[in-house]
Image (cartoon, coloured by chain):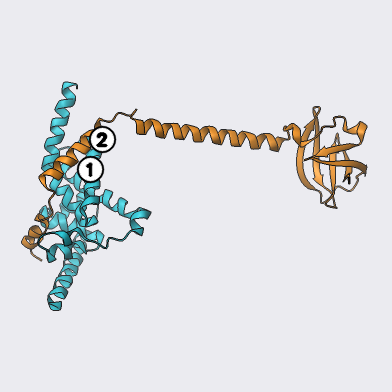
Chain colours: A orange, B cyan
Amino acid sequence: MKNKTFIQALNKVEPSKNKKDKMLENILSRKRKTKFSINYVWKLGMVSLCFVFCFLIVNGFEKEDMGINPTSIGPRTAMEETNDLCYQNICYEKVKGVKNKEGMKYLDTVYDNNKKFIIYQGEQKDTIIVKCENSYFLYQKIER
Amino acid sequence: MHASLVQREEEFIKIYQKYVDMVYRICFLYFKNHSDTEDIVQNVFVKLFTSEPIFKDENHRKAWLIVTASNMCKNNLKHWWKQKVMFKELDIATWEKKDETLETLLHLPQKYKTVLYCYYYEGYHTNEIATILHMNEATVRSYLHRGRSYLRELLEGEKNEE
């Protein structure tokens, strides 16, 4: 292909005068928009909302993981006295102490009256093992 | 408006008037339709206006515009939406006189377009194209060779069909 053919073909691709003016107008108007245009503020607002939302979600999860959420245990307070407890809205009663601690599956850590309770899954589905002050106790679900 | 801003805008308008056709042609080679081409041309000039790159001379500015235009086109064509929507309708079909050579040019593979444009239309040498597009000179020469053969095949094919 010769230069001439190429140039002739491409010479036909040219925006009209009106189009050029319209494009220039658009470019200048886009340039004149300041950083604080409506579009910019809207985007900034959306991003900050997302941050707030993420912050709330993360904090919510953290609290639940640490067992600070008061609904995760109780309403009973002194577990030693009453010999039963409520965990995740299911009530359990103390059955016996546990000596064999092998193969216990960790479930959760909860705090009640500034005491730390570590909850493990029992051998049966309706049982849990609770560690409190270095002692392990088997709890069974109370059937109602 | 501040006097320096007005001055800057006037300077920009001059640059725009000088290079708009060139940028338009490069973008049209990639997009094959006027509406997308207009969008990208605007983006290229907005980038020139907002980023305010420092140019050594007029040739440097021209090279920057060529590279930015072709990069923007490539990036835009990579977008998932553009890959989904096929360009079935070419705007050239709506032109008063259909140009077969131009149509053939538009069917060239993307990578050869900028090189061929710079060589034939802008009259750059292969070493200059290599510098502008950050490519090896041998690669530029091979792209030119392949692009030419591709065009020849397409044009001869069309003639044979006739």
**Residue lying at 73% horizontally and 35% vertically, measured from the top left:** A67
Q: Residues within 10 Å of mark 1 (few under 14, many from 20)?
A: many
Residue B76 place in picture, x, y as percent: 31, 51
Task: Choose between B94 and A103: the one closer to the eye.
Answer: B94
Check contact, mark 2 vs mark 1: CB within 8 A.
yes
- Disc 1 marks a residue whose amino acid type is Gln
**According to the image, label 2 marks what residue?**
A30
Q: Specify whether disc 2 shares its chain with disc 1.
A: no
Residue A96 place in picture, x, y as percent: 94, 43
**Residue lying at 16% horizontally and 52% vertically, measured from the top left:** B25
Rendered image: mark on residue B42: 1
Check the image and name the residue furthest to the top: B2
Q: Chain of mark 2?
A: A
In the drawing, does residue A112 fall left or right of residue B87?
right
* Residue B137 visible in image: no
Instruction: Report how far apart the C-alphas of labels 2 and 1 lie in the structure.
Output: 9 Å
**Residue lying at 16% horizontally and 75% vertically, measured from the top left:** B157
Task: Choose between B19 and B95: the one closer to the eye.
Answer: B95
Residue A143 place in picture, x, y as percent: 89, 46
